[in-house]
């Protein structure tokens, strides 16, 4: 069983499609198939790294809300990490639901402020209804 959270879910989906013998079941928690923020596709383009640095700076940081989040969550990350993530999203976007043969459990929150939960739901339904 492979469990993937956020962009780990994106990687797990890629693994399920490309190396199905490596896993029997897939659990995706708030899988990052698409970011909720509008305009993020622009950051994936040819000038994406420069635009990202201009708009967000070298790093994106936030204050944690509680001790558990502080203990288990990354509070600050380099914005240059976004370009490989966008590349992965584009790569996985081309994988049809039929390419993943394993059973998949998907959990997400409609209140997720980072990942597009509606898009995650649509992806899960396409897999379920294939």
Image (cartoon, rainbow, N blue to C red):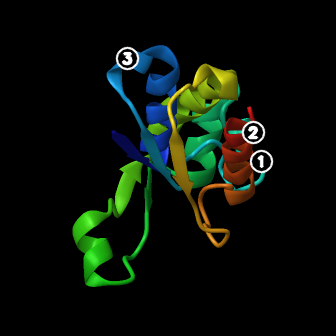
Horizontal arrangement in the rendering, residue 24 relative to residue 97 (left or right): left
Dot 3: within a 10 Å radius of its alpha carbon, few (fewer than 14), some, or many (20 or more) residues? few
**Residue at 51% from the left image edge and 32% from the top image edge:** 13
Residues at circles 3 and 2 in contact by the CB criterion of under 8 Å: no
Q: Quadrant of residue 126?
A: top right
Furthest-bottom residue in this view: 66
Distance (Cα) linking label 3 and label 2: 22 Å
Residue 25 versus residue 5 in the image, above or below = above
Residue with the mark numbered 1:
39
Residue 113 visible, this orientation: yes
Give the x, y percent position of residue 43. Answer: 67, 38
Q: Quadrant of residue 33?
A: top right
Residue with the mark numbered 2:
129
**Residue at 71% from the left image edge and 56% from the top image edge:** 37
Distance (Cα) linking label 1 and label 2: 30 Å
Give the x, y percent position of residue 84. Answer: 50, 29
Dot 1: within a 10 Å radius of its alpha carbon, few (fewer than 14), some, or many (20 or more) residues? few
Which corner quadrant holds the C terminus? top right
Question: Which of the marked residues, 1 or 2, is nearer the chain's N terminus?
Answer: 1
Query: Disc 2 on helix, strand or loop?
Result: helix
Query: Disc 1 on helix, strand or loop?
Result: loop
Horizontal arrangement in the rendering, residue 59 relative to residue 89 (left or right): left
Query: Disc 3 on helix, strand or loop?
Result: helix
Q: Quadrant of residue 4?
A: top left
Give the x, y percent position of residue 93. Answer: 68, 28
Q: Nearer the viewer, residue 68 or 128?
A: 128
Residue 120 versus residue 130 in the image, above or below = below
Give residue 21's mark: 3
Q: Nearer the viewer, residue 88 or 97?
A: 97
């Amino acid at each position: 069983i492979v469990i993937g959270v956020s962009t780990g879910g994106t990687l797990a989906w890629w693994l399920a499609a490309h190396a199905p013998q490596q896993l029997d079941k897939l659990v995706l928690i708030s899988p990052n198939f698409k970011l909720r923020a509008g305009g993020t596709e622009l950051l994936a383009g040819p000038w994406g790294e420069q635009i990202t640095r201009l708009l967000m700076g070298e790093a994106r940081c936030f204050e944690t809300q509680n001790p558990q989040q502080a203990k288990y969550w990354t509070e600050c990350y380099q914005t240059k990490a976004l370009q490989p993530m966008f590349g992965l999203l584009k790569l996985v976007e081309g994988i049809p639901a039929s390419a993943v043969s394993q059973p998949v459990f998907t959990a997400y929150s409609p209140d997720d402020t980072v990942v597009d939960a509606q898009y995650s739901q649509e992806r899960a339904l396409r897999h379920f209804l294939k």
